[in-house]
Amino acid sequence: MAGPGLVTGGPRPAPLTGLRGLPAVFWWIWASLLINWLGAFAGPMLAFSLTADRGYSASYAGFVVSLPGLGAIAGNALGGVLADRYGRRVTLVSGHVWTAAAMAALGLAQDRTSVAAAALAVGIGTGVVRPAAGAVLADVLPAADRQRAFALNYWAVNAGLAIAAVLAGLLVRQGYTLLFLADAATTLLCAMVVLVMVPETLPPRAVRTPAAEEPSGGSPGSGGTPIRRDLPFVLFTLLTVLFALAFEQRSGSLAMVMAAQGHSPAVFSLLNAVNAVLVVVVQIPLTRLLSSSPKGMVLCAGGLLAGAGLAMTAFADGPGLYVAAVVVWTFGEMFQTPAGSAVVAERAPTRQRGRYLGLYAAAWSTAGFLGPAGGGWVLDRWGSAVLWTLSAVLAGAAGCGWLLITGAQGFRTAPAVREEGGSPLPRVATEGKRA
């Protein structure tokens, strides 16, 4: 049964020029993203809710906290396929509605099975949204604008998180359940914004040229080489897993190391605040400065800066040295995040953008699920010096690897696809929680 999110052909809305030359509908997506993260109350408080409010053990709480990451891995893959097959808009709306229902269930559940199932469902929903939102951006923006747009989205995430942390501290005084219900409400608001303001952007169904025909694999009409045969992109994604595993240590492992050194939670919170404020203040002008630089060079610099910051952490024993390390690795983060997403959007064949962005998102979700356990395992066996050294090596190696891969001839050229009738794809003017 066709619906607004399932139409893949026919006339498209005319382009609308928005602020700073970006399409107007992109800004609706950006606004929905900001609203979503402004309402991200429950995530940071989930462990407290499970232990202090519902009386579960620390080990069970840790297990539940890891489940959204596991769910996101499946959600990323599912969201990519759905966005390419049925449409970006219907995938975004469905993902947001699913996430809102799961978040409300997580706040109300009491028995172990229901809590775990709801936490896993939250991860699936948030995972579905991310590749669909990225595909919208790639559909409606030329390559020259994508890095700037991804940077603006990343800015919205950090600005929303910073404000949400303060609001969550106020709301929790009225009870933990209110946090989850308010989080669900903002997610539903995001779904409404997308439903009302964002048109479908999935390009018309493409057909392959004879040169691009594959003997097997790939969905009908997807065009281009199946992802599993795009070895440069697969390698790019594996390097992303290595980088993300290293970068993940700045949260859980860092908190454990600082606690062992006798630092208070307030000092750890200060470091998180430094990270968020830097992104909010510096990300947009930095991206403008880097806009004309080759993305491979930007990614390499991001990996090396992140690695340098993680290496500095091995020598930190006081707040001042920790702040210095955070500043360095945050610059690495600001170099890598928009450029990485932009490279993937450029690499992806038109009809496989959701799948490519889904696989890239899954690299980060995998690290979010495995990183805390892996970091704790290294800490227990070899100590913090080995952990930070290994993390620095992984981040730096990923940066150098990205440079080599993206510098290879033809990497940024997607597999050949021609459109029905031989005409280029028309663009529409457009561009979701935890997207």
Image (cartoon, rainbow, N blue to C red):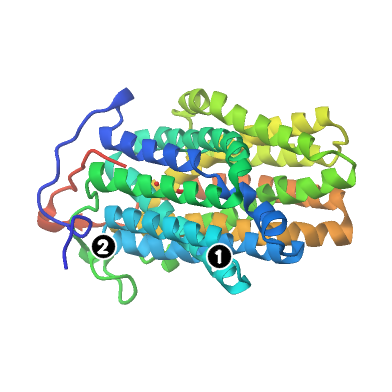
Residue 146 in the image: x percent, y percent? 38, 38
Check the picture and name the quadrant holding the N terminus.
bottom left
Which amino acid, by three-letter code, is at mark 1?
A: Ala
Q: Secondary structure at mark 1?
A: loop
Q: Nearer the viewer, mark 1 or mark 2?
A: 1
Residue 86: mark: 2
Q: CA distance from mark 1 to mark 2?
A: 32 Å
Q: Is residue 188 left or right of residue 270?
A: left
Residue 413 in the image: x percent, y percent? 36, 49
Label 1: how many Cα within 10 Å (few below 14, some 14–19, many 20+):
some
Precedes in sequence: disc 1 or disc 2? 2
Q: Secondary structure at mark 2?
A: loop
Residue positioned most to the bottom: 216
Label 2: how many Cα within 10 Å (few below 14, some 14–19, many 20+):
some
Residue 109: mark: 1
Query: Is 294 in front, or is 103?
Result: 103
Quadrant assignment, res 85: bottom left
Q: Is residue 216 left or right of residue 4?
A: right
In the picture shown, does residue 260 fall above or below 120?
A: above
Q: Is residue 408 visible?
A: no
In the picture shown, does residue 409 fall above or below 167?
A: below
Q: Is residue 214 visible?
A: yes
Please tell me which residue is depicted at 82% across the width and 30% down the height of the picture: 319
Which amino acid, by three-letter code, is at mark 2?
A: Tyr
Residue 11 in the image: x percent, y percent? 10, 48
Q: Is residue 248 left or right of residue 3?
A: right
Residue 16: mark: none
In the picture shown, does residue 154 fall above or below 369?
A: above
Please tell me which residue is depicted at 33% across the width and 63% down the height of the picture: 82
